[in-house]
Image (tube, rainbow, N blue to C red):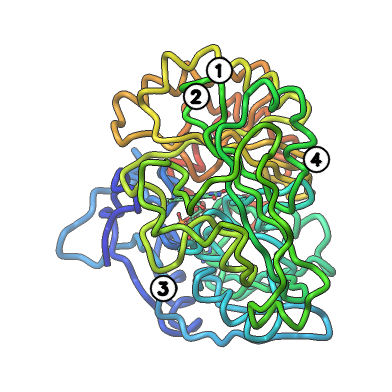
Amino acid sequence: MEKHNWAGNIEFASAQIHTPQTVEELQELVRASRKVKALGARHSFNDIAAITEQADEPQQQALEPSPWAYISLDRLDAPVTFDHARGTVTCSAGITYGELCPLLHREKVALHNMASLPHITVAGACATATHGSGDGNGNLATAVVGLEMVTADGDLRSLSRERDGETFQGAVVGLGGLGVATQITLATEPAFAMQQEVYEDLPVAKLYDQFDEIMSSAYSVSLFTDWQEERVNQVWLKRRLDGQAGAAASSQAAALPVAADFYGATLAPTHRHPVTRFSPDPCTPQMGIPGPWHERLPHFRVDHTPASGDELQTEYFVPRGHAVAALQALERLKEQFASRLWISEVRSVAADRLWMSQSYGMPTIGIHFSWKKNWPAVAQLLPVVEETLAPFNVRPHWGKLFAIAPALVQAKFPRLADFQALLQTADPQGKFRNGYLDRYIFAA
Ligand SMILES: Cc1cc2nc3c(=O)[nH]c(=O)nc-3n(C[C@H](O)[C@H](O)[C@H](O)COP(=O)(O)OP(=O)(O)OC[C@H]3O[C@@H](n4cnc5c(N)ncnc54)[C@H](O)[C@@H]3O)c2cc1C
């Protein structure tokens, strides 16, 4: 198993990666280890999943068993079970959306939303409040209705939305700090068909004038821009073909008509990659072709490498009402950062009640940057971008790169003190704590 993250900028070399096959084996491992971090698909760009050396930790002895353990659930034997009466599915926390969604579709049920790629695990995505787009769509963690995890003492603990109220809202976006999730229960809905279209060259003036209409014009709307001209390069619209329940599972849904123009943008003549000059082969079908929800909600196909494959990512969330002003401020800065960028993406996320979600208590707009992979250059740019966005009450994506001072990050999450208390109660010895949690959650 590779000992680094997807982008190759974070190493997981400080401890052995264990792959327990049973929950009992996992419990034993957690009991026997002094530091534990669960690894998902390792798609995060920062050290959120890394066990980082602390000043008070003894050096590792090469020949002694490590008291530090990474845990991957790749081999955990856990069935996927459906409760159709309740509209839920229970699965291994380590399953990827790419593995799970076809099983859901076969059972004629769907998730409300997906990220740009299906390669990430359910536990890893929910732990960082990973999101897709859509004015009415909460992030992926808002689908979680039940959670089972191995806690610091090796016990198995279950939490449910119905039973555990606020504690549950605190635990779902847990940043890997509460325990190793073994099973997750997600809310499902009847399967649906979708189609997506891409429009090119949306004039930015139109975007600023009619931002709300544009972002609410489909079930999920994504804007891709390289900030180079006075236009947004691409608008991706993902529309639901509701009322065709029978057709949804068989991909036989009738397509909605596709307009040639969208607020001054023109329909792309062929399938597109978000970076127009790249091959669209890794992307899900566009051109208004109907298909199942899980093959349209993500931008990237499960059987291809997503995105550019050679990048670092950053994302900031601004309250919906600040979106246009924040985009305009970034546009004024574009000369400084555009050449370092593959592409930016703008998406909307509905408000939720999950304590550590970036959309806690307010709808947000995510402004994402896929940087060309040059960390020294990106590291210099982040503070400049962040200073520009500072007046807009930004919250960073927990799984991407940012340079905002820990105290400022903490100040943006109104339930931080409750979350600290939740982690301290669940894990008084700090078994699941790492440098990242020490910095952004616990630093005074
Ligand atoms: C190409 C690419 C595209 C992306 N697109 C999007 C996007 O569209 N939207 C978006 O919001 N983000 C996106 N991301 C970011 C990504 O979704 C998040 O970083 C997500 O957390 C990655 O999930 P993972 O399974 O790789 O988890 P990891 O990165 O491995 O882990 C993330 C966190 O989850 C914890 N964790 C993992 N498994 C468990 C478990 N079983 N129990 C407890 N904690 C656990 C880890 O300890 C860590 O704290 C993208 C990343 C890449 C590389």
| Mark 4 or mark 3: whose residue is earlier in sequence | 3
Q: CA distance from mark 4 to mark 3?
A: 37 Å
Nearer to us of marks 4 and 1 is 1
- Disc 2: which residue: 227
Q: CA distance from mark 1 to mark 3?
A: 50 Å
| Mark 2 or mark 4: whose residue is earlier in sequence | 2
Mark 2 Cα shell of 10 Å, populated few (<14), some (14-19), many (≥20): many
Name which residue lies at 63% across and 72% down.
292
Specify the label residue 361 is tagged with. Answer: 4
Q: Position of residue 408 (x, y in %)?
A: 60, 24
Residue type (three-letter) at the residue carrying disc 3: Leu
Q: CA distance from mark 2 to mark 4?
A: 30 Å
Residue type (three-letter) at the residue carrying disc 4: Gly
365 relative to 428, above or below: above
Q: CA distance from mark 4 to mark 1?
A: 27 Å
Nearer to us of marks 1 and 3 is 1
- Disc 1: which residue: 331
Cβ–Cβ under 8 Å for marks 2 and 1 = yes
Q: Position of residue 150 (x, y in %)?
A: 56, 71
Which is more toward the observer, 213 or 48? 213
| Mark 3 or mark 2: whose residue is earlier in sequence | 3
Residue type (three-letter) at the residue carrying disc 1: Glu
